[in-house]
């Protein structure tokens, strides 16, 4: 007799799809940033930063099983998806504020600051994806399929997005989608703190686009 597994709500498939898409899109964006503003071979550092951050996020989930218990998946996903958006934009701002021409003795400091800044959003994403893949009931691989499909769409979609908007605006949009997915996951949980955080982060890019520009 086949064992019946609990059914996963559809919002979790949507959440991992969006977050995987946002993560891969963000990785490609910083690859473009690095290739334009630094020596071209530094573009490949984006892959290393992404892998480091995602692995660090997975280790965070496994090292703190009480905090990331199955019953807290929705709340923790919403919180970390919002922080993915916040730290992703913060890393871009940090990178743009680092001077391109600096004294040789300060090069390592600048690289360390940039590395820490860009590892953080991938850590938040790693926590979210690991939560959904390991703390929800097994669903025959469909959750992982949604993860891969989202990643594929992110790789292709960001190319067309950059034809329409600049990379900074694209970063804001990516973060808004990630936070919006968190809001959908947590909206029925009753956790007002996570609900307000994800809602505020998701709406921030829309507020920015409607603000009058100062001359």
Image (cartoon, rainbow, N blue to C red):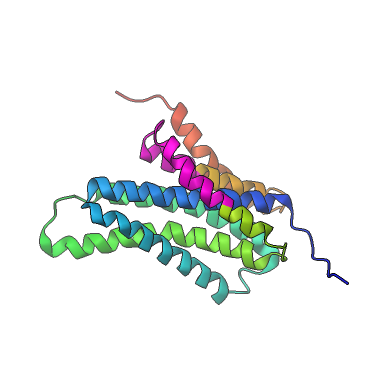
* Residue 166 part of the magenta segment: yes
Percent across and percent down for residue 104 are 11, 61
* Residue for point 63% across, 68% down: 134
- Does the magenta portion include 35? no
Q: Is residue 50 left or right of residue 145?
A: left
> Which quadrant of the rendered structure holds the N terminus?
bottom right
Q: Residue 186: tell me if it is visible.
A: no
Looking at the picture, tell me which residue is in the foreground, 111 or 67: 111
Of all residues, the one furthest to the front in this rendering is: 1
Task: Give the quarter of the image for residue 144.
Answer: bottom right
Give residue 28's position: percent from left, percent from top: 39, 49
Q: Nearer the viewer, residue 122 or 142?
A: 142
Q: Is residue 170 left or right of residue 114?
A: right
**Residue 3 visible at all:** yes
In this figure, what is the number of numbered marks? 0
Above or below for 58 versus 121: below
Residue at 38 percent across and 46 percent down: it is 29
Residue range (magenta): 149-175
Seen in the picture, residue 81 relative to 3 is either above or below; the reply is: above
Quadrant in which residue 78 is drawn: bottom right
144 or 196, nearer to the observer: 144
Q: Residue at x 45, y 59 (%)?
A: 122
174 is higher (above) or lower (below) than 44? above
109 relative to 168, above or below: below
Q: Where is residue 32 drawn, in percent x and y?
A: 32, 46
- Would you say the magenta stretch is mainly helix, strand or loop? helix
**Percent position of residue 93, x then y:** 33, 47
């Amino acid at each position: 007799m086949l064992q019946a597994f609990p059914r996963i709500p559809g919002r979790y498939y949507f959440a991992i799809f969006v977050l995987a898409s946002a993560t891969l899109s963000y990785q490609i964006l910083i690859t473009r940033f690095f290739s334009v503003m630094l020596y071209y071979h530094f573009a490949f550092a984006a892959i290393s930063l992404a892998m480091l951050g995602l692995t660090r996020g997975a280790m965070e989930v496994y090292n703190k099983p009480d905090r990331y218990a199955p019953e807290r998946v929705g709340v923790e996903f919403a919180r970390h998806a919002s922080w993915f958006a916040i730290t992703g934009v913060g890393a871009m701002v940090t990178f743009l504020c680092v001077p391109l021409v600096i004294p040789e003795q300060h090069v390592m400091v600048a690289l360390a600051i940039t590395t820490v800044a860009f590892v953080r959003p991938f850590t938040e994403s790693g926590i979210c994806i690991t939560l959904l893949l390991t703390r929800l009931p097994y669903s025959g691989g469909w959750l992982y399929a949604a993860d891969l499909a989202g990643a594929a769409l992110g790789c292709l979609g960001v190319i067309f997005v950059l034809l329409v908007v600049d990379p900074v605006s694209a970063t804001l949009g990516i973060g808004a989608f990630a936070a919006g997915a968190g809001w959908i996951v947590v909206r029925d949980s009753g956790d007002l703190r996570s609900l307000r955080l994800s809602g505020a982060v998701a709406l921030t890019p829309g507020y920015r686009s409607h603000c009058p520009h100062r001359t």
